[in-house]
Amino acid sequence: MIWTYIFKRVLWMIPFLFAVSLVAFLLIQAPPGDYLTTYVAKLAETNEALDQAALDNLRQRFGLDQPLYVQYFKWVGNLLTGDFGMSFEWRQPVSDLVWGRMGLTVTLSLATLLFTWAVAFPIGVYSAVRKYSIGDYIATTIGFIGLATPNFLLALILMYVGVVHFGADVGGLFSSEYKNAPWSWGKFFDLCQHLWLPIIVLGTGSTASLIRVMRANLLDELHRPYVETARAKGLSEFWVIMKYPVRVALNPFVSTIGWVLPNLVSGAVVTAIVLSLPTAGPLMLQALLSQDMYLAGAFVLLLSSLTVIGMLISDILLVLLDPRVRYE
Amino acid sequence: MSDVIASPQSSPQSTADAQDKYAVASQAQLTWWAFKRHRLAMVGLVVIVLFYLITLFAEFVAPANPTKQNRRAVFHPPQMVHVFDRSDEGLSIRPYVYEMKRQRDPETLAISYVPSGDKIYLSFFGKGEAYKLWGLIPMERHLISTVNPRDKFFLFGADRLGRDMFSRVMYGTRISMSIGLVGVAISLVLGVTLGGISGYYGGRVDNAIQRLIEFILSLPTIPVWLALAAALPPDWPIYKQYFVITLIISLVGWTELGRVVRGRFLAMKNDDFVIAARLDGASEKRIIFRHMLPSLSSHIIASVTLAVPLMILAETGLSFLGLGLQPPAISWGVLLKEAQNILSISQAPWLFIPGAFVVVAVLAFNFLGDGMRDAADPYEH
């Protein structure tokens, strides 16, 4: 049963991913001109010129002279074999550039998701159970401010505090001695030391909204008759709340993973640029600006796929958690 | 009137009066009463009205020309306004700021500003730099100006080119707040049309539109915006940039509204009053526009209010990255871009002030929207 559901759900992803690839391709094609126009403009700035023959030669080599749909199908066809094409700017296969950065992006997003849940769950339950207490007001206030502050502003403020009051540059994900080192335990611990700042920056917004979701859901459930019954049967207050209303209130909480993940991935782009993290964001921005289309396309495609996968996970979790959600 | 009559012995009478009052009140009145109870929403309303007044009269509120550079005021710190003036003639109410003198450290050559002890007096509605209100009406009075027109004052400090931050933030308010409104207007048209079609006709059309909405929602917004915005030629005139950026933002923003409208249409389609209208032979157009949309309007207004801050945040983020509006244009995001450099903010932390405006505006819209959502259905309480 559950397996057929998952199977169907995965099948449904195929047209979805196809549409995503089409949008990604159209997006990277949207700017007027192509990589070579930017390249020639850049050369012209340094007073170098490329003659027309060399230009045509390059254009042919990159396949830029073919009609759009041919370019698209070539690109998608290569994607299926795991070949993302060449990056014009880096003169390297895109897959060499992309995976390391995507790995860090996924690590960062998952760590933030865990942080968000770990913080939002207890606070949400607390502010629902102790509605209108001082703690509830504090949580609500912080939550509202967290929602209203753009990620990059928070990052800037934390960086400012770090530089002015602690004299430390808090940007980046690794200390300089580990930046280009191969993976080791030392590098891993170094990563953990740097990870907390982007996690806080990225997590506040979604934590704030998850607290509100949890609080509202739980408030709806707390005064239901089944809660009274459990209490009347002599269950301790802690278990009354944890065993029944929290389980019901958890549903919408889980389904939020579907939109929290795209939000995190999106937010991570801007934050990474501000904090100069070696994740997907900064490289994608650069690729977009220089019309390095295969590199930019790979990022747009992979980031979108991440969110599609996030929705898949949330749908499956929902089915597992709630017997009322049917498999159709 | 009822306040005058209401004495202790007639209190049952006055509650009955109050109930009568509720019974005959119009929908708008009921909504307003419900809204007034929400104190934070009232605060939000006041803040937003203030911000839109600034939007309308930015030229008048700003004491200086926002693009005028001043080499002698680079990173000039903000000046505190003092209200009570203690002079030889005694205490009087006369706002002033202390003049700051520029100093250069002889060894490090670093520039610093020290209060000189001289007072610069300020006046309301005084004459200052000439300007044209809305580009049409020539005026020279400003909300605040210095009594001596040769003096300068910097309420929010100055940026790296010596431009007055206060004036810049006021002009930025104009663009950022109006982008929110225009963007929401575009998403409103898209959302109501597509959501309405989806909910009213149902079936295959509904299915297609729902898949489209799901698809747009699942795209990570910022990479998509970045890609779209990167396609804009940077040498476009400001108004063109402005329009295209709003369009880009609202292309993603309409989905939420579309969902709300669709849900309501679906729920309402088989309500008695709609069926009655249909049996009376009302045309489809009349059913939708005369009967269904009015009963949705309060919900639509609430969701619109909650959508404005998202637009403001989106524009700020894009411009901050240098992909939104480009420098001669001034918006909160463009201003915050100046704060991107850790060196300049450690030297001039007042560059964060536009960020505070963003936060306050977004909070105010959220409070207002929450209050409106609660008030939208006054019969519930």
Image (cartoon, coloured by chain):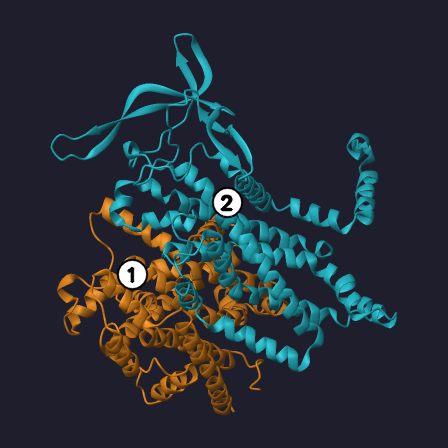
Chain colours: A orange, B cyan
Residue B229 - label: none
Asked which quadrant contains residue B111, the reply is top left
Residue at 37% in and 52% down? A153
Q: Can residue B261 be seen in this view?
A: yes
Circle 1 chain = A
Farthest top residue in view = B89
Position of A75 compared to B286: left or right? left
The amino acid sitting under disc 1 is Trp
Residue B381 location (% of width, % of height): 70, 54
Position of A4 compared to A153: left or right? right
Name the element at disc 1.
helix
Asked which quadrant contains residue B150, the reply is top left
Position of B282 compared to A42: left or right? right
Farthest right residue in view = B280
Position of B306 compared to B202: left or right? left
Residue bearing mark 2: B174
Q: Is residue B307 above or below residue B288?
A: above
Crowding at mark 2 (Cα within 10 Å: few <14, some 14-19, many 20+): many
Quadrant where the C terminus of chain A lies? bottom right
Compute the Cα span from label 2 to label 1.
37 Å
Farthest left residue in view = B107
Residue bearing mark 1: A196
Q: Nearer the viewer, residue A213 or B104?
A: B104
The amino acid sitting under disc 2 is Arg
Circle 2 chain = B
Residue at 31% in and 41% down? B349
Q: Is residue B178 above or below residue B273?
A: above
